[in-house]
Amino acid sequence: MVFSFSICFVSMMFLLFFSLGSLLLGVYSLVVDYSLFLDWEFLSLNGSSVVMTFVLDWVSLFFLSFVMLISSMVIMYSDSYMHGDYNINRFILVVLLFVASMLFLIVSPNIISVLLGWDGLGLVSYCLVIYYQNVRSYNAGMLTALSNRIGDVAILLGIGFFSCFGGFNFIFYLALFKEDWVVFVVTMLAVLAAMTKSAQIPFSAWLPAAMAAPTPVSALVHSSTLVTAGVYLLIRFFPSIEGTLIQVFLLFVASFTMFMSGLGANFETDLKKIIALSTLSQLGVMLLSLSMGFVYVCYFHLLAHAFFKSLLFLCAGVIIHNVSDFQDVRSMGGLSFNMPLVLSCFNVSNLALCGMPFLAGFYSKDLIIELCSLSTMNYFMFFILMLSTGLTVSYSFRLAYISMFGGFNVGTLSSIGDEDRVMTSPMLLLTAMSCVAGALLSWFIFPVPSVICLPLFMSMGAVIVSVIGVLAGLLLSMVRMFGVSSLYYYFNSVSWFFGSMWFMPFISTRSVSVLPLGLGEHYYKMGDHGWSELAGGQGLYYLSSYFSMITQWFQDNSLSVYFYTFGFWLVILLMAL
């Protein structure tokens, strides 16, 4: 494998170097319990100081390291994936700007500097979503930008409220002034911002729509950067969330988002959208564990999820490339015989997502389920959690069965293979991390093991729902083979409801635009094409044309016109006399 000193190679080596450095610093700060605050005050006005602050503790340093590692692998993968693109240098620069915005947000305990990274993520994500310049990409980019703009406004309002304290370092005020109404309002605004960035209900529509971006962007955005920014912000804001009604509200939102996305993924046929919905489901798991008070468990799952989800997207990109750029899973099948290496990595990431023992997802997801079993969670929320776990296994098994182990359904002109080492090398590294990252992170984050004592039926609950999920995925993937495809006719409305994320895309687009567009069309027809035309240009045209016809008639050299005119003036003269 030979690399040239291209922008991809230089960027990859740069990010790898700083990723290793951040990891070593993070381990050191975790072992010695050391945090570093860097303050730079560049404006003080009326007793309120605007300070640029950076915090370097083990939480931010670990996250920095993982983001840069995954970004380096994505950029290395892009060197081959975007090889035919004439603007690949511009693409890599925009991706680096996106990574820089995320890094800026991670190390910012100051709400003003958080806004800079937050807005940078929103702006650059719009540029990346519309990278393929077509109508579908423009619509998806606009939906992404406008949905995230709500969170940007919430952060701006939070800056305004924090000016009451004379400073903007929220990390100093959250626990100290927890009962203050200003902190409560700012916390509500932060939760709203996190809901928009992490695509929680009712802002879920933009996440699958953002799949219009190139696959390397999806691997980066939906694993460790954009969508996890909201979860990371709430981890920092947790001292003001704990013990309030906001925590209960967040629990309901996360549970229903997790359930909705898991159900929708079982009815989706677009490969990238299935993976996007699985990302949404895992974001719900993270916020559910956060709302239950398990902050570091949420952070643990955030880091572990980044590896196998980025690997899942990279494998999906190779598969889509090999099947002539089709994304419908029904046009794939039997790929395991032609792409054994890619399919092995794909199945490892799928198993890690399902929580297969001793893979990365197992250590975090199983811990979350067991801690929720021990906690005071009500039966309904616990049922939603277990059901969503089964749905995760169901859509993962359905995806693997339909596209990988079914009948060969690929076009005859497709060149299928996994010989591209530039694309497979990052996947092999991420596969290794998907296998060992869970155990390594659990040793670092939880050095003292916790003993969890549960009855046998509760300990086996996750295994039982996983087996049920495998059977449900097998049934959904083979439903036509059993001759019950007619059920889709009778349950078409129900499947459409589930497959469209509970009509969330229509609510986020048509319901918002139908009133102004309808009024605009009404006034356009009544105004521009109605009375303004008759009283304006068209009316003057018709009136002048009518009078021109009359004057033209008078100007005709006709004897009848002469006699009519003579008679008219004779009558006038007689009346005057």
Image (cartoon, grey):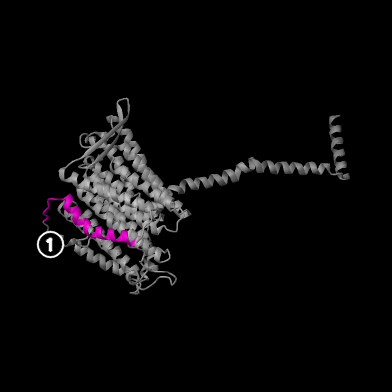
Neighbourhood count class around disc 1 (C-alpha, 10 Å): few under 14, some 14–19, many 20 upward: few
Which quadrant of the figure contains the C terminus?
top right
Would you place residue 460 above or below residue 523 in this image? below
In this picture, residue 326 sits left or right of residue 201: right
Type of amino acid at the residue the image marks with label 1: Leu
Q: Give the range drawn in magenta.
A: 423-452
User: Residue drawn 69% across and 43% down?
Assistant: 541
Would you place residue 102 above or below residue 326 in this image? above
User: Residue drawn 34% across and 44% down?
Assistant: 101
The location of residue 499, given as percent across then percent down, is 36, 60
The location of residue 255, given as percent across then percent down, is 26, 53
Is residue 460 highlighted in magenta? no
Q: Where on the picture, by quarter, is residue 410? A: bottom left
Q: Where on the picture, by quarter, is residue 434? A: bottom left
| Between 150 and 123, the one nearer to me in the picture | 123
- Overall secondary structure of the magenta section: helix
Residue 503, can we see it? no
All told, the count of numbered labels is 1
| Between 269 and 304, the one nearer to me in the picture | 304
The location of residue 331, given as percent across then percent down, is 40, 68
Would you place residue 470 above or below residue 87 in this image? below
Residue 424, can we see it? yes
Tag 1 residue: 456
